Image: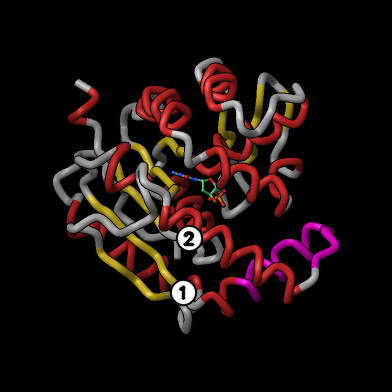
Amino acid sequence: MTAEIPVIAVDGPSGTGKGTLCGYLAHWLHWHFLDSGALYRILALLVERHAVDINDEVGIASLAGKLDVKFNNPGSGQEIAVVLKGEDVSQLIRTESCGAAASHLAAYPKVRKALLTRQRAFRKAPGLIADGRDMGTVVFADARLKIFLTASADERAQRRHKQLKEKGFDVNLPQLSVEIIERDTRDRERTVSPLRPADDAVVIDTTNLKIEAVISRVSMLVRDRLSDIPEFPGENIY
Ligand code: DC
């Protein structure tokens, strides 16, 4: 029964440290990982590659139903690779324009519906770490632990700026700030599965926290809530 397979849902806007936290948790617990944002970003990439109209909800939903995506977690804090039909698209999907197009098509109910089953298929033993916007509210509403990360828009823009520059992207901070606020507003205000914490989520404001502090706080919550799991590892790696 997949319902018995534990899920930890981590939601929140971009730049809050979700990706780093989830990579750590997946490595520590030896659990599977779902970066749901990557699925929306890959769809945006395919829309561009196949010259599909960004307003064609039915066409995009049909692409969503056929996605062949894997996440390769090399562990020890290294970035998780996103593989589309054997092609490593990790870098290609990280641009701000891809993020903006992803947020646009993520508002289509038919697209979200088509991705629902695909996302749930990542729930495999011994457990799943799910990163996104609606993991705790919709996709895995029965998750054993729900975390919602927040941070001020300024801090998030600074973090994204640093991250993108390190990856070699040429980015302008004020423009990035505007794009981040636009994307958040769209994600929060859409009618289907808007970005919001689940009623039973633990909300952590990371504005003034180092990522190590966030990881340490969440690993304590994991120990507390999932202590009944037989193969639970004894030691934190942090
Ligand atoms: O987490 P991210 O920045 O890679 O996500 C890209 C976009 O995808 C985000 O702006 C909104 C959308 N998204 C979503 O609607 N639902 C999710 N579960 C994950 C992402």
Q: What residue type is labelled 1?
A: Ala
Q: In which quarter of the image is residue 109?
A: top left
Q: Residue at x 33, y 48 (%)?
A: 9
What segment is highlighted magenta in the picture? 157-171
Mark 1 and mark 2 lie on one chain; the one further toward the N terminus is 2
Q: Residue furthest front?
A: 55
* Left or right: 135, with 110 as reference point: left
Q: Position of residue 219 (x, y in %)?
A: 33, 61
**Residue named by callout 1:** 151
Q: Which amino acid does label 2 sit on?
A: Pro
Q: Position of residue 207 (x, y in %)?
A: 47, 79
Residue 228: give its label. Answer: none
Q: In which quarter of the image is residue 118?
A: top left
**Residue named by callout 2:** 13
Q: How crowded is mark 1: few (under 14 residues within 10 Å), some or many (20 or more)?
A: many
Q: Which residue is drawn at 56% across and 47% down?
A: 103
Q: Are marks 1 and 2 in contact (CB under 8 Å)?
A: yes
- Residue behind label 2 places its C-beta within 8 angstroms of ligand 1: yes
- Quadrant of the image containing the C terminus: bottom left
Q: Position of residue 221 (x, y in %)?
A: 25, 62
Q: Residue at x 42, y 69 (%)?
A: 150
* Observer-nearest of 80 and 159: 159
Q: Residues within 10 Å of mark 2 (few under 14, many from 20)?
A: many
Q: Position of residue 105 (x, y in %)?
A: 56, 38
Q: Residue at x 24, y 52 (%)?
A: 145
